[in-house]
Structure formats: structure tokens, C-alpha cells
Image: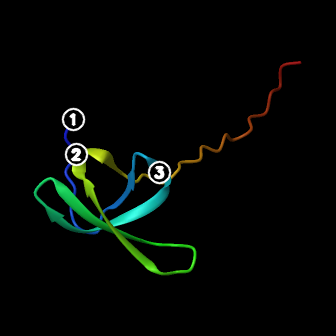
Amino acid sequence: METEFKEGDKVYHKAKPNIKWIIEKIDGDKAHCSTLNDELKKVVEEFALVTIEKYTPPQFIIDVPRRNNHY
């Protein structure tokens, strides 16, 4: 399954899924991505497109309590 990436997409690298990156530029099969480190300095890395996946925000499902009238 091939995922289409475009500039501005939020992605994460499979080796470190806890860091969110933003694609700045795509060159063939490589993506130039940036993020901010702990000191709020911009970090730029180059990743192969096959090693990144699109970021999807976590989804929370809230269960609505239902009244049970059967005792």
C-alpha cells in the first residue's frame, strides 16, 4: 500500500514514533523533514519515504452511559 505524501504533511519515522515531523520538501524517494527539539531549535533530517508514516491523531471513544432498568 503506497501512501502519497505532500509537503506540509505531519509524519513520524518508524524508528522513533514519538517524534512528529513535518515534510518540507520531497526529492524522489526522500523527504526532508523538520521538527523542534527540547531547546526549541529546528532540526532537519532526510528520510526515505518507505521509513515514514503519516501521523494520525489519537482518537478517543467516549461511551455514553445507558440506563439499565432491568434488575
Picture residue at 21% right of the left edge, 35% below the top: 1
Give the class, few, some or many, for how many residues have Cα within 10 Å of label 1's Cα (few <14, many ≥20).
few
Q: Amino acid at mark 2?
A: Thr
Q: Nearer the viewer, mark 3 or mark 1?
A: 3
Residue 44 horizontal side relative to residue 49, left or right: right
Callout 2 touching callout 3 (CB < 8 Å): no
Residue 68 horizontal side relative to residue 29, left or right: right
The C terminus lies in which quarter of the figure? top right
Residue 3 is labelled as 2
Callout 1 touching callout 2 (CB < 8 Å): yes
Picture residue at 60% right of the left edge, 43% below the top: 61
Task: Give the secondary structure at mark 1.
Answer: loop
The residue indicated by pointer 1 is 1
Q: Residue furthest left?
A: 28
The residue indicated by pointer 3 is 16
Of pointers 2 and 3, the one earlier in the residue sequence: 2
Report x, y in % for residue 44: 34, 71
Vertical order, 24 against 47 (above or below)? below
Closer-to-camera residue (49/67): 49
Q: Where, by quadrant of the figure, is residue 20 drawn?
A: bottom left
Residue 36 is labelled as none
Gap between marks 2 and 3 measured at Cα: 19 Å
Q: Amino acid at mark 1?
A: Met
Q: Amino acid at mark 3?
A: Lys
Vertical order, 58 against 65 (above or below)? below
Q: Where, by quadrant of the figure, is residue 64 drawn?
A: top right
